[in-house]
Image (spheres, helix red, strand yellow):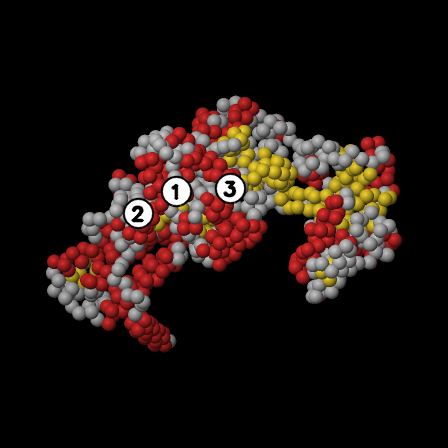
Amino acid sequence: MTSNAKPAASAAADEAKKASWIAKDLSATVKRDALMEIERKWQKDWEERHVFEVDMPEDDSVAPEALHDKYPKWMGTFPFPYMNGVLHLGHAFSVSKIEFATGWERLKGKNALFPFGFHVTGMPIKAAADKIARELEMFGPEFVVPEDDGADLENKLEDMSISGTPKAGGNFRGKKSKVEAKTGNKKYQFQIMQDQGMSNAEIAKFANAEHWLKHYPPIAINDLKAMGCKIDWRRSFLTTDYNPYYDSFARWQFTRLREMGKIKFGKRYTIWSAKDGQPCMDHDRQSGEGVGPQEYTCIKMQVLSWSTEAEQIVAATPELAGKKVFLVAATLRPETMYGQTNCFIGTKLEYGFFQSAASDEVYVITERAARNMSFQGLSPIDGQVSKLASIYGQAIVGTKVKAPLSCYANGVYMLPMENVLATKGTGVVTSVPSDSPDDYAALRDLKKKVDFYGIKPEWVEDFEPVPVITTEAYGDMTAPALCQELKINSQKDRDQLAKAKEVAYKEGFYNGVMSVGEFKGQSVQEAKPKVRELLINSGEGFAYAEPENLVMSRSGDECVVSLCDQWYFDYGEASWKALAEECLAAMETFDDETRHQFQLKLDWLHQWACVRTYGLGSKVPWDPSYLIESLSDSTIYMSYYTVAHLLHRSLDGSSTGPLGIQPQDMDNEAWDYVLLGKELPAGHSKCKELAVLRRSFLYWYPVDIRSSGKDLIQNHLTFFIYIHTAMFPKQEWPRSVRINGHLMLNGEKMSKSTGNTLSLRESCDLYGADATRLSLADAGDSVEDANFEESTANAAILHLFTLMEWITEAQKALCQSEASPNSTVKVDDIKLRPASSPLTVVDRIFDAEMDALALSTGTEYEKTMYRDALKSGFYEFIKSREWYVNVTADSGMHPTLLRKYINRQVIQLCPITPHWAEHIWKTVMGNADSIMDARWPTDLPAEPDYSLLAVGDYIRKTVRSARDAETKLRSKKKK
């Protein structure tokens, strides 16, 4: 029997990790512990004083629309995390961008709001809960897996459908998924949870989906508090009908969007999980996020004569008697079909004879393609394939087929090709050597080596490329020209062929003109849809779609494309897209690459399925049998933050807010008034209370910045733009979006399977909050992947502790100097000359450098470039102070400049290391007010004093040259 204890390898890895922590320098641990004690003190103080709870100004003399001007506000948001686990360091990295910005905006004197909610909509929690329930049934409360039939049990689990619908088609397995990588190759859900330190009794509670909602959000809140985040927790909430207030908000927006015509109903292609019996959208996927349907034109090539081996197989299959058999190829370029010279088959691939929806037609394709077709009305029974026989590609070689539109009207032959994939299209590849470099190279190889490839000369010798498309760059033989230009000698030159393929497609599509057929003289862009329509209308082709790449659902199902009736957002509709583009044009994106990625997505995005039948969520208002899907209830929830604290004071809405508004009070008319400014119906029972909500919304909206990882551009962030433009007037559209890359740990991708992972709580426990925050700031700011170095976190502990000690001693010296302003003061290594002494050139240089670095730090904070702000506001600021201490070692520092240095240093670090800054500000410097109420220096010059900075550089270079000369002289004397 397999034990339910934590696997030995995993336990050993944990022990090794603990041992490495214990082995750290004990002195560093003492310093870390001292800093962490400071952090706990100020976190408790901030919470007790409600420092981060920010409300709209209570000033009825100012109209709601004018509150912004008199009381500047700032609202920053982060995409709420999904609550099926604890927050990891990647979450913390994205959170830190808003966290640091909140600190900066407070320093500027704004009412800075950082709200934070929790996402539980969708399939993952429900699917995981159902897995636990099934595993309890199969393995019992102690989760004991029988060793002899563990594999059989795993197969049973895989075959169990969440929806109760039998799994359609064959067993299609893909590569290791994203979730598998994260969970460290654990077979079962209970093993994943055992790795989190849970007992079997606790794990059993997770068979109820509601337990997940109660368990993980409080942990996330505590972890973010441990990081010292400036979050107004009164505004937090859970999504779905678990919170009736948010439920009414989600249902309201869906109702209005449908009335606007933004939500429509009809047949469309969508990524579909047969196991789950519903669309599989991005948040429902183990792998394949962002992958959509790829539409093809399938070409029906009727068999004219079989090869000898294939004829024997056909004759031995009575189900094929009297039926027309077609080799079916899937193409993205129907306009090139006039140039077909042959058709390729993968000799080692297994194909099937599949009954089509037409009773007298059979298709020869791969089983994967047949499974996709079965969900698109192309098989006798929806969702089921009807396989009549199997055949390997080698047996098909030499078969003669009729190629629609080809000038070779008497038929073309099926030929072998080395790189036909079973994972793309149908496994049957139509060949147009005039415009496809791959086809040209393969046909040329076959002509040169007929014996080697085992084909007859007559199958290839009389079939030459046919002009189909003419371009200015390559004439009417694009593929041969590119093969010559790129020196492609055979079909094995795959890298060069990939380049040639890309050039050929772009050149043909954008600059090509048809040189043959019914649409001769028309551009390829005009002719392409017309040729497709011609083929479909004639019965020689049909529409087909499949996922662009492998998509695996969280239930372990390889997804297909289904053509089904469903509710969908009509993203991409011309007038709506124009509004989204207008919104993007006015938004700050902080770098060109982010803007470019949004533009690409707006060009690509089209209809999006917005409902599902399984999981957690709010019910669709007009059809309660459906649930609103997870990426569709989370597009404008930032507006909910503006009123959440007034509606309820608990995550689930069970604790009513200060205005006494009940969930039933928030009907569609109430939300219309609060968020859209429409008039309330006469006699509404909550007019006065709703007016407070309306005022709060108008004060806090729009969103000033939304910060996120780059992976959300392809869905959530683009939807966020679209729905805002549909629901709100332009003055309430989002003002900016900031994108960051993914976070690596110690230069490697974070993964549980490799042990290279760190949760937010682990980092705060290991290094403390401020060292973690400083390391996150130092990790990087661009859309490229960033890197959290644990060595940086260790170094941060030393830097912060050393600087704290130095400032503490310096502050003592300043106190003595204030008591004796005309005397020189020395405390340990801190020496101050009389405060009444005049400023020297060195003093003025140091003063100019402090101003220059403060200006640079402010600029970088404003640009949300926190690594650069840390560089100028911390590292270079310390370096400048160290130089000043050295050059004034004999005379002593000027007290005025030392006081200015300490004040500036604390304020500059405050957004990044707030606990450390608060300790210095209040405990060391003796300020009565919190550092959270401090302001950015107002005595900064408009620009640096470049002349004094130049003098400082000259002095440094002169001293360096003198020291170098002295070193050389001593070296010569030794010789």
Residue 537 % position (x, y): 75, 45
Q: Residue at x 30, y 43 (%)?
A: 55
Q: Residue at x 62, y 40 (%)?
A: 268
The image quarter containing residue 437 is bottom right
Going by the numbered disc 1, the residue's amino acid type is: Gly
Q: Earlier in the sequence, mark 3 or mark 2?
A: 2
- The image shows residue 123, relative to residue 576, as above or below, that is above
User: Which residue bears the numbered disc 1?
Assistant: 677
Front position in the image: 241 or 276: 241
Q: Earlier in the sequence, mark 3 or mark 1?
A: 3
Count every numbered label the image shows and give the total.
Answer: 3
Where residue 233 appears, as percent x and y from the top left, is: 34, 39
The label shown at residue 63 is 2
Q: Is the residue under label 2 in contact with that under label 3 (CB below 8 Å)?
A: no
| 404 horizontally vs 886: left or right | right
Q: Is residue 345 left or right of residue 291?
A: right
* Residue at the outermost front position: 682
Q: CA distance from mark 3 to mark 2?
A: 30 Å
Q: Quadrant of the C terminus?
A: bottom left
Mark 2 surroundings within 10 Å by alpha-carbon count, few (fewer than 14), some (14 through 19), many (20 or more): few
Which residue lies at the image location 85% right of the left edge and 44% below the top edge? Answer: 304
Q: CA distance from mark 1 to mark 2?
A: 14 Å
Can residue 564 be seen? Answer: yes
Label 2 secondary element: loop
Q: Position of residue 970 (x, y in %)?
A: 33, 74
Which of the marked residues, 1 or 2, is nearer the chain's N terminus? 2
Residue closest to the eye, 231 or 454: 231
For badge 2, the amino acid type reads Ala
- Mark 3 and mark 1: span between their CA atoms? 17 Å
| Residue assigned mark 3 | 260
Residue 111's place in the image compared with 684, above or below, is below
Q: Is the residue marked by circle 3 packed among few (<14), some (14-19), or many (20+) residues within 10 Å?
A: few
